[in-house]
């Protein structure tokens, strides 16, 4: 099949920026001239079409869960449930679809491309998306190790730095669930989160009903600071009002602007790197390499840790059961 320049630009835009500037998958045989990322992508789009597919089949390049989900939906990839759990096998299937089965129209759908020169009036503005985002924003509590400026003057949780820093099995964090911002998750007792990163099947979370939070000698006290958590676009596509959901697919520009604004203002990237925030109670899910945000909406986020780098720990509740998930990026 023959792909348009616009489609090829979109495909190359999915690849990591450093691969575009100096592609290891071509062993230095092809290298774009110095310039901006967009200029280098445009240069690649002028090259023989086979390089697009060669780049996407490179083992080192992994598509994230969000992109894979889009392609899988468009191409109707039929896989067994256990195969869907392996993101690498799924990507291999997607690469095969790109090289063998996709039409140009399907690729345009995947990337929400618009190759027409006529301006298109969108159904939604980015301001309308933000209004809806604020409507369904959730209250959260950030857990810090400083009492100053905290909403609570007594510890809301405890953190065991020795266990977490050394990946040792044990109760990394304990939370007084009386202070949880989500009333549906609030409970009279302490949630103990036992993490065993080397044996994930042995990680668990359990509510000890009626227990009060007592800070042990090896633990650090964490105090709560009230905050607000806004949903990413994938969550809006599911949780927004029907009117907004129906219009999102017809508003790619507004969606792009919302995603950029969300990433710059709302995504907790700073909390993952340099902060005194140890964890977060409540909030909306975020996309991870192995699981898109909207795929997590069948359960409620109880907490997410930020301290001690990877692995980050998330605890979910579904029904009356708690689930502990290790996150590695």
Image (cartoon, grey):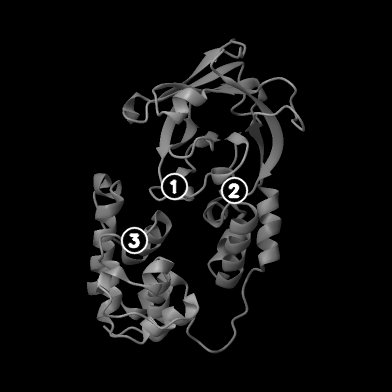
Per the image, the residue denoted by label 2 is 270
147 above or below 8?
A: above
Q: Earlier in the sequence, mark 1 or mark 2?
A: 2
Per the image, the residue denoted by label 3 is 72
**Disc number placed over residue 295 in the picture, else none:** 1
- Rendering coords of residue 23 (x, y %): 33, 72
Based on the displayed image, in which of its 4 quarters is residue 141 positioned? top right
- Rendering coords of residue 106 (x, y %): 36, 74
Nearer mark to the viewer, of 2 and 3? 2
Q: Is disc 2 in contact with disc 3, using a CB cutoff of under 8 Å? A: no
**Disc number placed over residue 189 in the picture, else none:** none
In the image, is 103 to the left or to the right of 187?
left
- Name, please, the residue furthest toward the bottom: 117
Q: Is disc 1 in contact with disc 2, using a CB cutoff of under 8 Å? A: no
SS for callout 3: helix
Give the number of callouts: 3
- Rendering coords of residue 13 (x, y %): 43, 72
Q: Residue at x 41, y 83 (%)?
A: 33
195 above or below 62?
A: above
114 above or below 309?
A: below
């Amino acid at each position: 099949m023959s792909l348009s320049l616009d489609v090829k630009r979109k495909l190359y835009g999915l690849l990591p920026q450093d691969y575009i500037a100096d592609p290891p998958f071509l062993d230095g045989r092809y290298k774009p001239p110095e310039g901006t990322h967009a200029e280098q992508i445009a240069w690649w789009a002028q090259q023989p079409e086979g390089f697009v597919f060669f780049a996407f089949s490179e083992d080192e390049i992994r598509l994230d869960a969000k992109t894979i989900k889009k392609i899988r939906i468009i191409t109707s990839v039929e896989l067994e449930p256990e195969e869907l759990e392996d993101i690498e096998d799924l990507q291999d299937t997607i690469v095969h679809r790109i090289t063998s089965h996709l039409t140009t129209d399907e690729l345009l759908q995947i990337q929400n491309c618009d190759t027409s020169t006529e301006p298109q009036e969108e159904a939604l503005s980015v301001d309308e998306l933000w209004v809806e985002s604020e409507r369904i924003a959730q209250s959260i509590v950030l857990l810090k190790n400083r009492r100053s400026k905290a909403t609570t003057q007594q510890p809301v949780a405890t953190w065991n730095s020795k266990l977490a820093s050394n990946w040792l099995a044990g109760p990394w964090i304990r939370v007084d669930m009386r202070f949880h911002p989500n009333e549906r998750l609030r409970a009279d007792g302490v949630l103990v989160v036992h993490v065993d990163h080397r044996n994930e099947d042995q990680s668990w979370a359990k509510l000890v009903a009626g227990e009060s939070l007592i800070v042990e000698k090896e633990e650090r006290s964490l105090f709560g600071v009230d905050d607000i958590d806004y949903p990413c676009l994938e969550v809006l596509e599911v949780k927004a009002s029907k009117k907004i959901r129906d219009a999102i697919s017809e508003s790619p520009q507004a969606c792009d602007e919302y995603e950029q604004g969300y990433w710059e203002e709302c995504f907790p990237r700073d909390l993952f790197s340099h902060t005194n925030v140890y964890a977060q109670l409540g909030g909306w899910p975020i996309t991870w390499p192995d699981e898109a945000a909207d795929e997590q909406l069948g359960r409620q986020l109880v907490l997410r840790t930020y301290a001690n780098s990877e692995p980050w720990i998330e605890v979910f509740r579904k029904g009356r059961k708690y689930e502990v998930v290790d996150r590695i990026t």
